[in-house]
Image: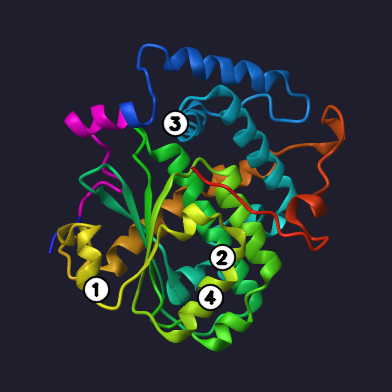
Amino acid sequence: MKLKSELLVQPSGEMWKKIRVELNEDVNTRNQDLAAIKEWLRKQPHLPDEWEDRPLMTFLRGSSFSLEKCKRKLDMYFTLRAACPEFFTNRDATSPELEEILSKKIQGPPLSGLTPNGRRVTICRGVHPNLDAQQIIDCLKLALMIGDVRLLEELEGVAGDVYVLDADILGPSLLAKLSPTTVKKFMICVQEAYPVKLKEVHIVNTSPIVEAFINLVKPFLKEKIRKRIFIHKDIKDLYKYVPQDMLPVEYGGTCGTMNEIHEQWINKLKEYRDWFAAQESVKANEALRPGRPTNYDELFGIDGSFRQLSID
């Protein structure tokens, strides 16, 4: 068994070169692009004047270095920080509420290694079948917290994300507690505000209830995303997409146990405690937005209209 010492191994060599092409990243001009985004941010009265270079560069990479797309993503990111306090406030991994979830309820660590084509793999699984409605919201909060850490820690960028969802303990009682509004808000956050390039979703340890869960989420996804969801009856089928040796031992791999990898991420989230606290004020101010302020009810389709979401 081997456990990589680095939280996130960065691409290098030929893989690094290929990812630069895939991300449309020119190392000779990327700093100019970064400067342009920082200047644009300073000119937006409703957005923060300053933000760290690392997450801004991650947004540029997630936008394939399209400045206009990057601006839209950033605007939405800071807008949703204000619009979804249930996800973006009280993000203290040392709090009793989040500590209980992290230690007893769920695991969702990104793996340290990369697939041969440069993609980051995240495995999500429950470890306790009983979650109340607030704990479900907090689980989604923690997923976005990990996303924020990756904004700063993906130093070189990756060629997309692969998610493995272990549905072993997903049962009817848990599914019944999922609020469609909460799911919709979370999907908007992930798809429209974060620089995520979702390549594949693999569901393992399936059961009939999984189909109900997928049907719950599908209305929020475009057809091309639905085609990226794969259900595996046998864990060995997953190895066609994710090399077996980069998986945790629970899934037939050799890169440590889920508990060990998850513990590394718990420690990382706690290290970011002060950063998360400072970020609560880094959000959009709709009172200062030029033109019409964002209507949150319209944004989330609370009026009953289910907007289809897009993802790159």
Q: Which residue is mark 1?
A: 235
- Lower sequence index among marks 3 and 4: 3
- Lower sequence index among marks 4 and 1: 4
The answer for how far apart the CA atoms under marks 2 and 3 are is 27 Å
Residue 257: within the magenta? Answer: no
- Furthest toward the left, the residue is 1
Asked whether residue 277 appears in the rendered view, the answer is: yes
Secondary structure type for disc 3: helix
Of 307 and 90, the residue lying toward us: 307
Q: Quadrant of residue 257?
A: bottom left
Q: Which residue is mark 2?
A: 218
The answer for how far apart the CA atoms under marks 3 and 1 are is 32 Å
Q: Residues within 10 Å of mark 1 (few under 14, many from 20)?
A: some
Q: Tell me whether the residue at label 2 lies in contact with that at label 3, contact meaning CB atoms closer than 8 angstroms.
A: no
| Residue drawn at 37 percent across, 44 percent down | 160
With 266 as the anchor, is 43 left or right in this view? Answer: right
Q: Which residue is mark 4?
A: 213
Q: Which residue is mark 3?
A: 61
